[in-house]
Amino acid sequence: MHRPGTKPRVMKKATSNTFKLNTSTASSAPSASPGSSSTSEARSSNTTSKPAASGSSATDSFLSALATASTVAAATLANVLPDVHVNLFCLCETSGDLVFVGAKGRLCHVNIHASKPSLHDLTPTKSSDNVNAHVLSSASHLAFNPRGTKVLVQTNEGALYVFNLPLNAHHRLTPTPQLVQVVFADGNRRVVKLDDVPSPDTTSVQRALATLSPSDRAKVKTVVPDVFEVDLRRLLLLPTVTAVSATWHPLSDSHVVLLTSTDDLLVYATDDSTFSPEQTHPLSFAPPSSSVAASATTSLSFGPVTGWEALTVYILRSNGDLFALSPILPHDGASVPASLLRFLHQATDGQLTLANVDLDTRIHVKAQKHWLATVWPADLPPPSVDEDEDITSPLSAPTNAWTRSSTSADAVATLHWPVQLQGPFPYGSATWSHPNSKALSVAAVAYPGASPNNLGRAPVLAIGWSSGHVTIVRGYTRCALVFVC
């Protein structure tokens, strides 16, 4: 997500490289030794310092993200956005879909991969025009789900909304039947519903003008024959609770994970008509000492689809403390690469065969093994030669390379294990101590070479500060999936 005035670039959503088993079986991250902690500091040219935490759709291909970024040229956008003042946008880098919020809350869509990109207005449903206009004009964050079919909207007031893109089976926008949009000379727009039985002697433009009063008809600038309706649905929170940070779950196209102002981590199933949270995880942080200023939770970020990291949420506090919570998995509908599941089973079995494993570690590894068997009780599909090739492509339907979780609320309840918050994890800098600065956002730094089975990769995280600095944390002590047993 970018704002105008900065260098044109598109960064992939933070594919956090973070949550690890204690046993490493792969090489470490670039120049970072396993189990060690090193940091570097960079001064951002933009003092708002929200580094990459608010991105677009996530894929595991760093080169794919760079290739997509190179296609978003100023000249390309200038041809399709002559009069749209872009305030905010998000990108699905695989499909090329861009969703914009412009002046006065105008919502637009353009596909940069099309041979001739064309601009389309996305029109909120007529039932709540005033509410939707306020939501879009106050939007502070947009994000695509992994397949690029839904968009998450966060406002300055801490409210969250979700809408589906009106896409057909070929991932192309589909107009709403019997609707046209009338554009007036003063810039205002009005959606008009046409008669169900059209007259053979009149066009849709003539039928739309016939619904207007003579005074309104004189102010018409143009009539747009295609209307692409979207329905902004709000994620319901208590009146005194606001959303601090939110993101899509990387293994689900319909689940949103968010942090609240009351230090709760909520999981919402956005296909649920009630929009009540599917899961609630209270976060308990140690109270600060009298000599330390109080801190607040400011941001969260998921890990990539590598090892336990795809099930791990990283949580940042304003004082810079970094925590992790795992496993966070939707009750139903998550799709996980079968190769990753096989690897996790093999890793846990391998740890249990080691003679030098202490009792506490053995208990946690057995808990991991039991959890895997409970969530995915069915036999895994046989290995496929295509499993390691683009398994996270948003446009490809799940094949035998994917296994859907059979989790349910009842199955999870049988475990009786609350997820344990881990941290804070130590990191530091010899050059800057962040004086009078607050940590605002956390995101993983993408780097080439990651694969679903990279349990040994050391994490690379970026932490943004209110002073404009960005701390790059590489290779802090790894964590493991931990329950309160």
Image (tube, rainbow, N blue to C red):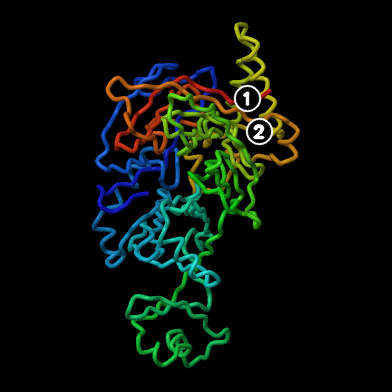
**Residue lying furthest top:** 356
- How dense is the environment of label 2, judged by Cα within 10 Å: few (below 14), some, or many (20 and up)? some
The three-letter amino acid code for the residue at tag 2 is Leu
Report the residue at 45% width, 41% height from top.
59
Q: In the displayed structure, would residue 431 be above or below residue 297? A: above
The three-letter amino acid code for the residue at tag 1 is His
Labels 2 & 1 near each other (Cβ < 8 A): yes
Q: In the displayed structure, would residue 207 be above or below residue 3? A: below
Secondary element at tag 2: loop
Report the residue at 47% width, 25% height from top.
290
Q: Is residue 340 visible?
A: no
* Left or right for 148, reference 435: right
Q: In the displayed structure, would residue 242 be above or below residue 36? A: below
Report the residue at 58% width, 31% height from top.
284
Label 2 and label 1: CA atoms lie apart by 11 Å
Checking the image for residue 345, the label placed there is 1
